[in-house]
Amino acid sequence: MYEAFYNFKERPFNLTPDPKYLFLSERHREALAHLLYGIRQRSGFILLTGEVGTGKTTLCRALMHSLDADTEVALIFNPNVSSAELLQAINQEFGLPGASESRKALVDELNAHLLTRRQAGKNLVLLVDEAQNLPAPVLEELRLLSNLETETEKLLQIVLIGQPELNDLLGRTELRQLDQRMSVRYHLTPLDVKETGEYVAHRLSVASDKPRPRFTRGALRSLYRYSKGAPRLINTAADRALLVGFTRNRIRISGSIVRAAVQELRGRKRERGGWTRPIWGALAAASLALGAIVLWQPAREALLRVARAPEAEQGVGAGERPGERMVRIVTPTSMAVLPEAEIPGPLATPERTYESLLEDLSRTDQSQSWSAATNALLERWNAPMVSGAEVAYDLHLAAGEAGLRYASLPISLEELTRLDVPAIVALDLDEAGTRYVALLAYENDTFRTNCDPNLWIPISVLENARRGNVYLFWKAQEEIADVVKEGDQGPDVLWIKNALGESGYFEGTRDAYFDSSLTLAVSAFQTAYGIEPDGVVGDQTKMLLFSALQAYPTPRLSASP
């Protein structure tokens, strides 16, 4: 919105943890040194803690860029998962199938990979971010993974990164063995007043060779009072202050501008011109609405209700000229008033082909494509959307907040059509690298994606460009035990037999005993959907059963939204 005004290449205070914006205070340098030391010395477990917003995740990304080519890294973000799901995610991050639901099979698969890579001279590192969200049994699973070793060294270095509550969690009696294995520990503290000013100057210089805005000493003091030195809060307040300065046509960002921005962040209002409104909130909403008008014609039709009203009803605010016809722009969450002359007309939308769509996608930032695809998938589940900064690295968090579960399946797009649920896939767009799209509907061998609601792309085009697994959400529609296997009995077994019977895979006796005929039926069902046919009903198999049964309210590829 304000980039051109301030001569920025991009917004300098974006919340996305971009390593190029990493500001190394003395404590950040110490923290990075501790992490690198622990990894290079093959110390086993390494612990990094810090308050919310102190830069742990950004430091994690910087660490990944600091490691040499002989170090291979798997990153798990916000791992609020079961032990089996964690093992599957770890194996998949290291490029392994990770399809089994058996813990032993997954550990054996990982151990064989670790031995092979160690013989090749590689050092394998597992980074677990937001580790305070790990359940105690999953932390114990990580401790057992540290037992994978040769006679002389550990095969896997494990870095736990989390908020201070992680120390409390490790202090539990049942986790004392894991706590004792932390060979390197570091607690990251916020910036001081001087470093806050240096941090702001650093980010401005990264965003532009010749940045125009100047934060005064009063502005920096106000930023520090609000943020207490937490980089995330500094970013939030500084970004809003730049927006306030933009609406006031100010290059010099003063303390009063920062305080106005902070008041808006805290939800305060003040009186202006006889009516209550944020000083700049309406203008910001108007700018966003105008961006929607110019850039996306359907947004004009779906989100904007433009109603002309007499000037006397609207009042004359800052920047308005008496006698000029004003237009009220209303969105579902805001209202703004602008001069009629500043409202642009609709733009013609050129006809698109799937080739041009992929070209446009290649010019999109990778994290933006991931966020857009994730939110499109959440929308199909009638779940609340989340910001790009939160979903850019992991789907577990997005699923958990929506009351859903997440799965990563090594299946083809043809197999996805049989599963009949919307999903996210990664596309390899040559020199542009990886971009992500959500597949929302399917008919006549074509998919409709989140990139264009009017364009259908042939399945062959997507399959040729696709790389990696298919990512999707699912919902546990029934309370079924974590694992149901041969020899078990009870209502869970009866439900499984009925579900497989409705799906055409089981024709035996519908009783409550898990016999060999049910094992064969489960294995056949698993084979049809591309997962390991072990005959055991775990999370992946339950997910496939819930999705296969039309009785449950699941979004379908065959039913366009």
Image (cartoon, grey):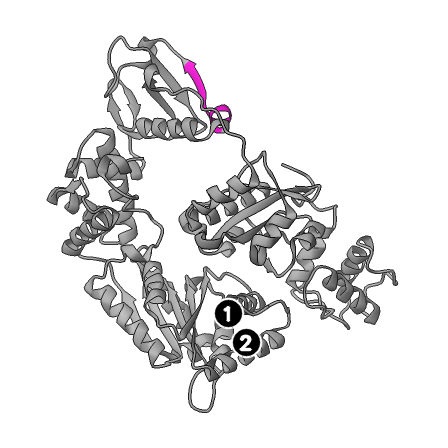
Q: Which amino acid does label 2 sit on?
A: Leu
Q: Please identify the quadrant where the C terminus is shown.
A: top right
**Residue 488 seen anywhere in this rendered image of the structure:** yes
Asked where in the image residue 466 lies, by quadrant, the reply is bottom right
Give the CA separation, mark 2 to mark 1.
9 Å
| x, y percent for residue 130 | 41, 61
Residue at position x 76%, y 64% in the image: 522
Q: Which of 12 and 70 is in front in this view?
A: 70
| x, y percent for residue 333 | 42, 30
**Residue 262 seen anywhere in this rendered image of the structure:** no
Mark 2 nearby-residue class (10 Å; few <14, some 14–19, many ≥20):
many
Residue at position x 71%, y 59% in the image: 529
Question: Going from the N terminus, do you reach mark 2 or mark 1 first?
Answer: 1
Q: Is mark 1 on a helix, strand or loop?
A: loop
| x, y percent for residue 553 | 68, 44
Judged left or right of residue 164, residue 229 is: left
Judged left or right of residue 466, residue 270 is: left
133, above or below 554, in the image: below
What numbered label is drawn on residue 94? 1
Q: What residue type is labelled 1?
A: Phe
Q: Please identify the quadrant where the N terminus is shown.
A: top left
What numbered label is drawn on residue 110? 2
Residue at position x 61%, y 77% in the image: 104
Asked where in the image residue 452 lies, by quadrant, the reply is top right
Residue 303 painted magenta? yes
First to last magenta residue range: 299-307
| x, y percent for residue 320 | 25, 17
